[in-house]
Image: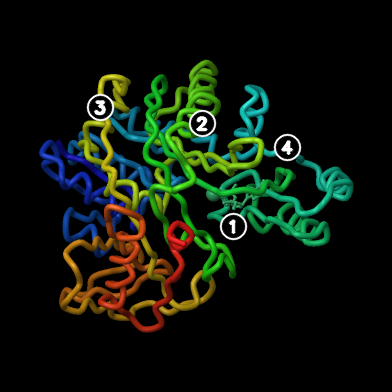
Amino acid sequence: MKVLVIGNGAREHALAWKLAGSTRVDSIFVAPGNAGTSAIAQNLDIASSDIFAVVQKSVELKIDLAIIGPEAPLAAGIVNRFQEKGLKAFGPSQEAARLESSKVFARNLMQKHSIPCAAGRSFTDYMEALRYLQSQPAPIVIKADGLAAGKGVTVANTIQEAQEALKYMMKDRVFGTAGDRVIIEEYLSGKEVSLLAFTDGKTAVPMVPACDYKRAYDNDRGPNTGGMGSYSPPGFFDTKMIEHILKTIIQPVVKAMSDAGNPYCGVLYTGLIITDQGPKVLEFNARFGDPETQVILPRLKSDLSDIMLATVTGRLDQVQIEWSNDACVGVVMASGGYPDKYRTGLPITISPGLSEDINIFYAGAKKGADGQIFTDGGRVLTMTATGHTIKEARQKVYSNINFVSFDNCHYRKDIAEREVI
Ligand SMILES: Nc1ncnc2c1ncn2[C@@H]1O[C@H](COP(=O)(O)OP(=O)(O)O)[C@@H](O)[C@H]1O
Ligand SMILES: [Mg+2]
């Protein structure tokens, strides 16, 4: 089988790495890929946003399965374009991807089907939103409706701060049309967890849960980032909770999408907060999460290509999906200054002594002519390790992290720490 992975992050490197371990996969292409994927697959010099070129090339190469990593091409309808050419693509259609690409769509669906989420309302009129906001207590959360590269949510501690976010989105239109509709919702407190599920539009099978760390600095300080680390499984989250979320959230969403004529196929990522009243949905993503994927896939014992093919062809009820009991911890090594200004083009050195137990999933990293790898983005790589316990996995990662270095490297030192103290 010939597969194509679309995207260039550590998530896509992890997907290609897992697929490379399958006996059914003969060749792997990645568009555009990075320094990590080029070592295990063939990179294609096509941006993931260039849907026409990606699909064209897939037809030419007779790709058996295309796997879409990031949200933007899904929201732009890449899966529909693949299907029009008679090719199989793993991911939701443009209509189904609205669960991520429109937070208002997701909220309306949850409200209609009594799926637990934060109380709140959506607005298209700035003055109306402002009046509502002024009647609410703080803290409060303001969300842009559309895709905003992880920057569209403000958790405001004061109404003043919330007002500024509202103005920024609706009047200054910093996120363009993505901020023309906003959601104002109650602040939820509790532990945050991501539960991803494979779904073929009828059956949904949850993966192992994971937690990610969004803030740039230790103890959840500093600005939000694309994610600075993750681990699986969270100790506070048991199989009973997974069953409960499957029944009260994931299955109802899958059924609602199918009943509405937009069956959802691919990975449904549910971001949750476990509140005193039980789990509530923060958001849905229409794809694998990054950095969660880097700690989830090393725990998958079954063949990923089998699961994906079954998902795409509506046979998910016929596959067995097995997970290892091991724990996995992943730490993101980022360019100093990220998520603000940072330098790129710095050589990455891997010193002898790096344990064979360590996985390095590259993201913003590219190979020079002589084979040397250079930094090429904010998040440069995710280093992961598995162990019998979170403690063991965590210890492996942090005792190896200094074997990988580049100037001005920044990483969090507290990933998964709360699980071991
Ligand atoms: N209602 C809420 N209460 C408390 N925190 C929230 C709420 N909604 C979002 N957050 C916080 O903001 C982060 C980003 O929000 P999310 O809805 O996941 O949007 P996105 O990932 O698109 O930026 C969440 O991971 C969570 O930490
Ligand atoms: Mg999120």
Q: Amino acid at mark 2?
A: Ile
User: Cβ–Cβ below 8 Å for labels 4 and 2?
Assistant: no
Dividing the picture into quarters, in which one does residue 373 lie?
Answer: bottom left
**Where does the image place residue 55, in percent across and percent down from the top left?**
31, 40
Residues 158 and 20: in front is 158
* Residue at numbered disc 2: 245
Closest to the observer, 136 or 28: 136
Q: Residue at x 16, y 39 (%)?
A: 2
Closer to the chain start, of discs 4 and 2, is 4
The residue that label 3 is drawn on is 320
Q: Report x, y in % for residue 302.
A: 22, 36
The image's mark for residue 39 is none
Q: Residues within 10 Å of mark 2 (few under 14, many from 20)?
A: many
Residue matched to label 4? 119
Q: Please, what is the three-letter code of the amino acid marked with disc 1?
A: Lys
Q: Which mark is residue 151?
A: 1
Q: Residue 13 placed where, x, y %? A: 28, 55
Mark 1, secondary structure of its residue = loop
Pointer 4 or 1: first along the chain: 4
